[in-house]
Amino acid sequence: MNPALAAGLQSALVIGVLAIAYVPVGDYIAKVYTSDRDLRAESLLYRVCRIDSGREQTWFGYASSLLGFSLAGVLLLYVLQRVQGVLPLHGDLAGVSPAVAFNTAVSFVTNTNWQSYVPETTMSNFTQPVGLAVQNFVSAAVGLSVAIALIRGLVRVRAGGEIGNFWVDITRGTLRVLLPLAFLIALVLLTQGVVQSFHSGFTATGLDGTPVTNALAPAASQEAIKELGTNGGGIFNTNSAHPFENPTPISNIVQVIAILLIPVCLTRTFGTMVGNRRQGLTLLTVMGIIWAGLLAFTLWAESNTRGIAAQAAGAMMEGKDVRFGIPGSVLFAVSTTGTSTGAVNSFHDSYSAWGGGALLLNILLGEIAPGGVGTGLYGILVLALIAVFVGGLLVGRTPEYLGKKLRQREITLAALSVLVMPALVLTGTAITVILSSTTGFQGNSGPPGAPGSIHGFSEVLYAYASASNNNGSAFGGLTVTSDWFQSSLGVAMLLGRFLPIILVLALAGSLATQTPHPAGPGTLPTNGRMFVGLLTGTVALVAALTFFPALALGPIAEALQ
């Protein structure tokens, strides 16, 4: 089948399922966070943990609770990895080394799921579900909570700036949203042959007659939340290219739908909670334009840029699984880099210069097409505030969004939130490349000026973009086992996750203290085609001005050679 036709059919199927789920899932999530009633299990949990579910927090209290919870998660996951050799279901696996344990603990708590180890030979079948899978749930619930807190800041009026209760939000997000959806997706994956076993592996006879040990794991349950929570950490080393994780083209489509489901439906949640569903559709339209545009460009790049001779020789399939082909691989790749998932069913390092560059750009846009669970919504809302500010300058009026005035404090917080990621990406890349002899940079370096050295730069840029945006995917030619990479990427994950969260919560608290003003004749409308164009242009302009020089040194230069 023609790749463009196959990609179109698969994309239409994904969009169709998302369209069916959009209203019920989006409205259900809104109901979860606006309900005044607690489930019995939640009430019991609040009593045991001594949580006052009726007490709301200011942005500072909300942020303090979030940071404390995340710090406890890092420490517990670090200890669990270090002592796994004496715990049940560890097989013959020893404790994880300190550097890898630190990097992994930070990675999973920040929803990055960067993996600098081989899962089936490093993490036991106790550490995987009890440590890593738990963080897959709660780290996604943290992002969801921050998005809801920002929505409350836009629609509420509180003299003290209260934006909710973090402990209630994370409990509801985990128990009412993520757990039931993950359970349903896991059941579907089981029907497609995804394994679910606590055995460490089994031995079979290879084609040459020698015994071969095949790893097993509780993959279906972890695969479901890995995609649904836009986490991305594989339970096997080859991630969603492994036949035990993603065995069929149908399971591949299911996983793409799981990746996009909550981020897409959250725009409906936003529209419902603010009382104007056109606002949510406007954000969804911008997300869809970026996602579809990069999908079409990457498909073209992987189908046409290497020439007919290369296609005949099979070069286009390098790094891609024949089960999914180019269409299924590109659809997965664009979806996973447009969110904070980072799961892969093909190897991005093997993509053409234009194709790999498009995936890198998708991350550098801020992962808002449609973004991670919660992170995509609050990310695009921050950019919407900046777009409104720019529009306000053009019409000569104080910028407003949903009736709330964007004063100096709000614009400063929004601008700082946008600037955190570029500062981390460009600083980390520059230090690593300049001090390559001490940082352990051993990518596809090649001789100076050769295409290999250009691609090596792209690998480093991709690594820091992935870590700072909490994506977790990588250009696989880069060796990241040195202490420099383990520590610097870990710091990039921490700062890239929590600095924007703190700034967004501060923004929510500031907005919550304002009384909404009715729209006047000079107020910039924030729904409709005009604002879609303004917001899309703002997203593209911010990324172009910030990252074009770096992209010109990497993927663009490589493509033009």
Image: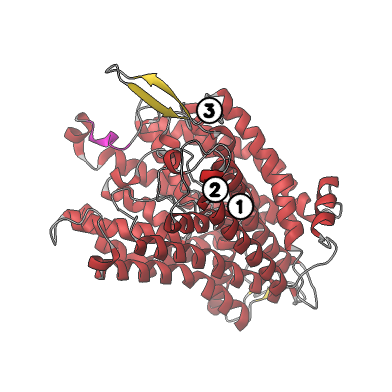
Alpha carbon of mark 3 to alpha carbon of mark 1: how far? Answer: 24 Å
Under mark 2, the amino acid is Thr
Is residue 420 found left or right of 126 in the rendered image? left
**Label 3 Cα neighbours within 10 Å, binned few <14 / some 14-19 / many ≥20:** many
Residue at (75%, 75%) from the top-left corner? 161
Q: Which of marks 3 and 1 is nearer the N terminus?
A: 1
Under mark 3, the amino acid is Val
With respect to residue 191, does 505 lie above or below? Answer: below
Residue 418 seen anywhere in this rendered image of the structure: yes
Residue 517 seen anywhere in this rendered image of the structure: no
Magenta-drawn segment: 314-319
| Residue 36 counted in the magenta span | no
The one nearer the camera, 92 or 552, is 92
Residue at (16%, 55%) from the top-left corner? 446
With respect to residue 56, does 302 lie above or below? Answer: above
Residue at (57%, 59%) from the top-left corner? 74
Q: Which of marks 2 and 3 is nearer the N terminus?
A: 3
Q: Give the residue at mark 1.
A: 140
The label number, if any, that marks residue 230 in the structure image: 2
Percent x, y of residue 522: 64, 75
With respect to residue 338, does 385 lie above or below? Answer: below
**SS at badge 2:** loop
Scheme of image coloration = secondary structure
The label number, if any, that marks residue 195 in the structure image: 3
**Label 2 Cα neighbours within 10 Å, binned few <14 / some 14-19 / many ≥20:** many
Under mark 1, the amino acid is Ala
The residue furthest front is 86
Percent x, y of residue 521: 68, 74
Q: Nearer the viewer, mark 2 or mark 3?
A: 3
Percent x, y of residue 518: 75, 72
